[in-house]
Image (cartoon, grey):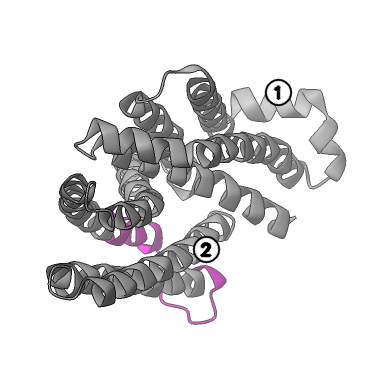
Amino acid sequence: MLIASALCRFLALSCSVFLFGASAMLALSGSRGLSLAMEAALRRSLRAAAVVGALAVLCLLPLQAVSIAEDWRAAADLDMLATVAFQTRYGQAWCLRLLAILLFLAVILRANPGRNRLRALVAGAALLPLGLSGHAAMEEGWTGCAHAANDMLHSLAAGFWLGSLPVFLLLLRQWREPAHRPDALRALMRFSNAGHVAVVVLLITGVVNAALILRTASPDPASGYQQALAAKALLALAMVALAVVNRYRWVPRLRAEPEIALRHIRRNTIAELWAGAAVLLLVGLLGLLPPQ
């Protein structure tokens, strides 16, 4: 049960992160021609992510019903599913997530090319309900509202950073082409500036989130939640280190040593993607573990 729930949470979150980050990065590219070319290259991936994400979110409701009832038959009990969906905060957040990702699927299937701002808004809306479920949903009053708002900011910052990395790799490929180099360089600089903001917001909201969850819990090396949280923090710091090395060591060397710089930037970015996938897997697990 825990493995199935963690896997579905991971798939749903990963797809939403990719849809938001990629769409936002395409919208910020600064060149319509470059944006359309990269969108065409990513269109199948965006559609696949929307389908997989919608299916994963659909599976989350029956899994939650099974968790509450402690009986696998609850997954097919329509009354139980309706109760969880409409009478719990988790279910209400689930409805919003499902609606947003289905809307994204409709937009990516029907909208004309170049509607990246619209797709980014819809995909961002699929991330926001994460702040209404999980540990933040266990609190009431102003503390609960602050925790939920902090979780929403954290989700958007993480979504932009992780989800835009595949587009960043495409930009590196475009940079190799002399005709596309000026537009690709401008887009890379825009990504760098927005990425700085996203990383700062991510780190601050991550610290605040951990403090809110653990404020009543004492440090416990045997706690599965605290072990997973520490692993997530270490992976996030490793990703920040890789991003800093790319930005301040290898990007300035693109003109002098383009092949060497591109090889290192690409390698570090792929390492960031793997680390980010591990972080999302841990996030899927953390929401299922008691903080203390």
**Residue 122 percent across, percent down from the top left:** 41, 27
Q: Quadrant of residue 123?
A: top left
Q: Earlier in the sequence, mark 1 or mark 2?
A: 1
Q: Report the quarter where the N terminus lies.
A: bottom right
Numbered badge on residue 282: 2
Q: Which residues are magenta?
A: 205-225
Does 221 lie within the magenta span? yes
Which residue does the image show at 62% across and 34% down from the upper left? 51
Residue 133 position within the rendered picture, expressed as x and y whole percent measured from the top left: 49, 41
SS state under label 2: helix
The outermost residue toward the bottom is 221
Residue kind at label 2, given as amino acid type: Leu
Which residue shows up at 50% across the image and 61% down it?
Answer: 277
Q: Position of residue 19 (x, y in %)?
A: 45, 39
Whether residue 174 is visible:
yes
Residue 226 horizontal side relative to residue 77, left or right: left
Asked if the residue at tag 2 contacts the one at tag 1, i.e. Cβ–Cβ closer than 8 Å, the answer is no
Q: Residues within 10 Å of mark 1 (few under 14, many from 20)?
A: some
Image quadrant assignment for residue 63: top right
Residue 141 in sight here: no
Structural crowding at the residue carrying mark 2, measured as other residues with C-alpha within 10 Å and reported as few (<14), some (14–19) or many (≥20): some
Label 1 or label 2, whichever lies nearer to me, is 2
Q: Is residue 58 above or below residue 226?
A: above
Dot 1 amino acid type? Ala
Query: Which residue is at 17% across, 47% downward?
Result: 190
